[in-house]
Image: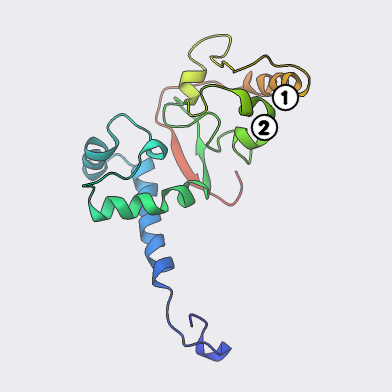
Amino acid sequence: MCQPKKQGGLGIQNLNLKNKCPLSKWLFKLCNVEVIWQELLRNKYRKTKMLCQVIKKLGDSHFWLSLMSVKDQFLNLGCFNLQAGTQIRFWEDIWLGNQPLKSQYQSPYNIVLKRYATVAEMFSSRPLNISSRRSLIGDKLTDWYNLVARLLNVDLQEGRDTFRLVPSC
């Protein structure tokens, strides 16, 4: 039905897709711009949580519920530029490489206790603030050493983490 008439369809526009585009733009601005409307949304819905941690609640506005319905798909379309690390989930978000660390280092991820910790929380102490359910041995230990070697070059800085939309980070 949504195919153009020249291709045998009815030419009906996909309104669901057309709605996701402006909602994604709102999410992008919510992640990257500091103006009064973002502050109002943060104070009402996010409080101290990161955008990825916020879930739908009874009583949320229709606008906020619409934003939450496209949030996960939006976050998979880009990656974060690391500054302070307070808005980036260490394992779940794309910030080091082209995939989340949970995909790059599946063995350690499967046994860590704090899967949703931020980058700032992980770097809050040396050695890294990572605890697991069992000992790292064999391939898990090798993966862990490879991850630690990559993290040696990461420095947290003052500033706000930003999100960028790119096909590959």
Q: Say whether disc 2 or disc 1 marks the residue closer to the N-terminus.
A: 2
Q: Residues within 10 Å of mark 1 (few under 14, many from 20)?
A: some
Q: Secondary structure at mark 2?
A: helix
Q: Residue at x 72, y 22 (%)?
A: 140
Q: Nearer the viewer, residue 160 or 71?
A: 71
What is the three-letter code of the residue carrying label 1? Asp
* Residue 105 visible in the shown view: no
Q: Nearer the viewer, residue 8 or 140?
A: 140
Foreground mark, 2 or 1, reads: 2
- Image position of 28 (left or right of 114): left
Residue farthest right in this picture: 138
| Callout 2–callout 1 Cβ contact below 8 Å | yes
- Image position of 51 (left or right of 115): left
Pointer 2 residue: 106
Rendered image quadrant of residue 134: top right
Q: Residues within 10 Å of mark 2 (few under 14, many from 20)?
A: some
Quadrant of the drawing holding the C terminus: top right
Q: Residue at x 52, y 47 (%)?
A: 76
What is the three-letter code of the residue carrying label 2? Gln
Residue 101, position as x, y percentages in the image: 61, 33
Pointer 1 residue: 143
Q: Secondary structure at mark 1?
A: helix
Q: Residue at x 47, y 28 (%)?
A: 83
* Residue 65 visible in the shown view: yes
Gap between marks 2 and 1, in whole Å? 8 Å
- Image position of 64 (left or right of 139): left
